Amino acid sequence: MFSPSQEELCALNKEPVKYGELVVLGYNGSLPNGDRGRRKSRFALYKRSKASGVKPSTVHVISTPQASKWKVDYMKDDPSLLRVGFVIGVEDEVEYPGEGSVVSVAISSKGHHSISYTLSRSQTVIVEYIHDKDTDMFQVGRSTESPIDFVVTDTISGNQNNDETQITQSTISRFACRIVCDRNPPYTARIFAAGFDSSKNIFLGEKAAKWKNPDGHMDGLTTNGVLVMHPKGGFTEESKPGVWREISVCGDVYTLRETRSAQQRGKLVENETNILQDGSLIDLCGATLLWRTADGLLHTPTQKHIEALRQEINAARPQCPVGLNTLAFPSINRKDVVEEKQPWAYLSCGHVHGYHNWGHRSDTEANERECPMCRTVGPYVPLWLGCEAGFYVDAGPPTHAFSPCGHVCSEKSAKYWSQIPLPHGTHAFHPACPFCATQLAGEHNCIKLIFQGPID
């Protein structure tokens, strides 16, 4: 029997249509200090009561001569500067902000959105955007200003994001990206680099990578870029990692720059689009987001399902093979506190024990121990249940752990994430645990756990 579609469910429940959800990698169900307002570990995108999208309209080419005023020049004689479908308006006269300053007034007097491309100190191209009744726009970034719908801050690996851990200088843009969703089925979601600020403007200064495309429209990249990776085969246990690409301000797809902030853009990838699919990853240079479609979430385990799996494991009364004491995963509400009955595991072999203080060897690292069952030497860590349901590719039992962090999830989910290269720094990529963002260890980055049942 097939599952009802998102549209059918919303019609039955009289709920607003959900376009999808953004889930921040590195958090196990919530932010360390709790989800607060627009700053949280996952954000649901719902159809708005009124359309909030915008689309490009008029192009203004502004020159700033040595005079106290300058004009917006509509290039009637040079259609190469106009994007297809642009409307030519009437001349506006605007105050010149001053010698050598960055043009920052755009066309805000009309209350419209605009994107400003500063070509030089004497010339700026401004593309005006008008209301689009067929789309909804959602904005993501570090800023807490009102235009940002989902506030994202830098993710620190190992889930150490707390009040004592401060980022000295964030690499996430204040207005990082925008996602535009069609208001009509199939509710296609598209991603664009950069977001509109409180003045409804996007500014690409002289140093930003920008260019005019062959069809005449302007485009550009943000300083550290917005990278996207679409998995091959969707977000399922059979999926394989795709290729990381960079998304431009106008939504075109490019190969990666040599480094994140290099001036030279990559090559245009004409056969790929900025359309998000279930499992697409969005990297903002400091935080990585997972896009889950509404239909994809219908086939994802829920928090209740994960809690039922936890209770099922505990009901089997797994025991420490040495101490013979019963082990139990702590409740989801206490997922960050090591408890007395907490299962621990040797991540080189997978044997699960209770906590003990023996097995140290002088020739090993501080957190490495010798397993008393098989004498294998390796990391010895507490096990934590992966509680963020959006990261699961199936509803299987939690049988595998990531190394070296000890987060536990289903076999297929563990194997999926262990092969996904995530951006790190300016040009490095490596797999990481989705629940805490810890870099995974080498080839054996996930291990099958070996539990011992009760002797009685």
Image (cartoon, grey):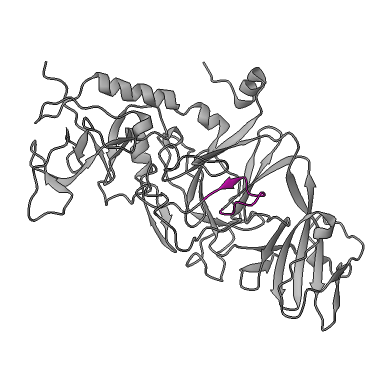
Q: Main secondary structure of the magenta part?
A: loop
Residue 33 in the image: x percent, y percent?
A: 44, 43
Q: Is residue 329 left or right of residue 360?
A: right
At x 20%, y 36%, the residue is 344
Q: Is residue 448 left or right of residue 207?
A: left
The correct choice, above or below, for 218 with respect to 27 in the image is below
Q: Residue furthest front?
A: 164
> At which x and y percent is residue 351?
16, 35
Tell whether position 216 is magenta: no
Question: Height in image: 9 above or below 385?
Answer: above
Up-down relation of residue 15 to residue 435 (above or below): above
Quadrant occupied by the C terminus? top left
Q: Is residue 281 above or below residue 263?
A: above
The x, y position of residue 173, in whole percent, is 56, 59
**Coordinates of residue 194 in the picture (x, y in percent):** 63, 56
Residue 290 versus residue 341: which sits nearer the camera?
Answer: 341
Looking at the image, which is closer to me, 37 or 428?
37
Q: Residue at x 47, y 43 (%)?
A: 232
**Residue found at the very far bottom of the displayed protein:** 66
| Range shown magenta | 142-152
**Front residue of this view, candidates 34 and 425:** 34
- Indicate left or right for 238 with 87 as reference: left
Picture quadrant of residue 319: top left
Q: Name which residue lies at 89% across and 65% down.
A: 92
| Count of numbered tags | 0
